[in-house]
Amino acid sequence: MNLKSHHQLIAKNGNVGEFISKFNKDRMCPIPYCGQQSVGSHSISDKYIRLMADTDNNVFHVPIIIRNNKSDEIMETKSTHDVSVFYGFCSGHEKLFDSLENFPGLPDANDIKKEQVILMSLRAIANRDYYNTLLIESAKQHDKYAEYRYKDYANSTKHYLNVYMKAIDDPSLIDWFEYDMPQDLYGNFLCASYDSGISVVTMPLSNGILRAYISTTMMSRSKLSICWNNPRIIVKRALNNNICVAPLWWNLKTTSEKEQLYKYILAGKKCQTVDYQGSIREFTIPPRLLR
């Protein structure tokens, strides 16, 4: 099931907003054996998003579902209230993440330990699981075999959710490392991305560093042995969705500078586009952005 298929399926539902509203209302917490109704969750902490907002309380956001067809129009303008929000955990399981929100200011590097990395990654994976489930529910409106046909796709993120939940009590199930992002991104860039078994979550630290925390399961780690010690490869592999950028900072960039930053955003990815009329287009980020 490729991206083009995903977007075609959700576009077929006609009134996308109405379909998603109903889906959100019926959404249950993805934690195994929970069964409680989901509430709106921020996959990227609202506390840090507000620090980079413009005077209208907006940021630029690269979503999981791309609806534009040009590389310079990938970003959507979203309010801090709405950006990175998905219907993930129930109100009870939301309390798992209190330790990420209760720093009096920006966290110190010593505040972020493996337990916090697991929690940050869990939110990124749950965000991706939400969109996977949304797309499959959309497919079921037109294909009675969709749940069976796409079960491997659905089970992938659910498997990682289960492992990361277990890792809260047994951190040895997860491997991770830190990677300091380019200095220019500090205060201007945040993400909680998950793709292909890898989670990349950034956190602005009190020492002026934007640190990326990259994690995967120990089982997946063995499959990544060739590139796991090359953070640039790993970051580019996973860092392709659910990204927030400061509007003022971005608008001051030259075209050349923006192209360099696209190395971190959807670099080399084939993207399919969809609008609310169901129009589908496909594009690849231009090779000149990959130098």
Image: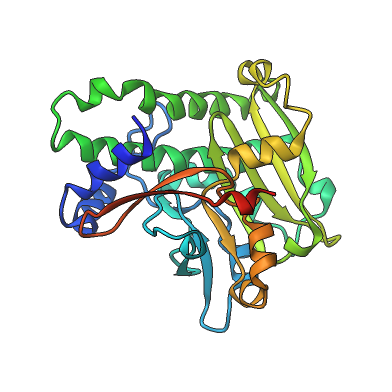
- In-image side of 104 versus 89 (left or right): right
Q: Choose between 114 and 12: the one closer to the eye.
A: 12
Residue at the spot 73% in from the left edge and 61% down from the top edge: 185
Residue furthest front in the image? 288
Judged from this view, the residue extending furthest toward the bottom is 55
Q: Nearer the viewer, residue 188 or 115?
A: 188
Q: Nearer the viewer, residue 259 or 154?
A: 259
Q: Can I make out residue 264 in this image?
A: no
Quadrant assignment, res 92: top left
Q: Image point 38% across, 41% down: which residue? A: 130
Residue at image point 40% right, 35% down:
30
Q: Is residue 116 above or below residue 281?
A: above
Image quarter hosting the N terminus: top left
Residue 37: x percent and y percent?
32, 44
Instruction: Establish if 249 lies above or below 63.
Output: below
Q: Residue at x 61, y 20 (%)?
A: 220
Residue 117 figure quarter: top right
Residue 39 left/right relative to 51: left
Colouring rule applied to residues: rainbow
Horizontally, is 208 left or right of 65 in the view? Answer: right
Let me know if residue 129 appears in the view.
Answer: yes
- Along the viewing direction, whichever of 123 and 194 lies nearer the viewer: 194
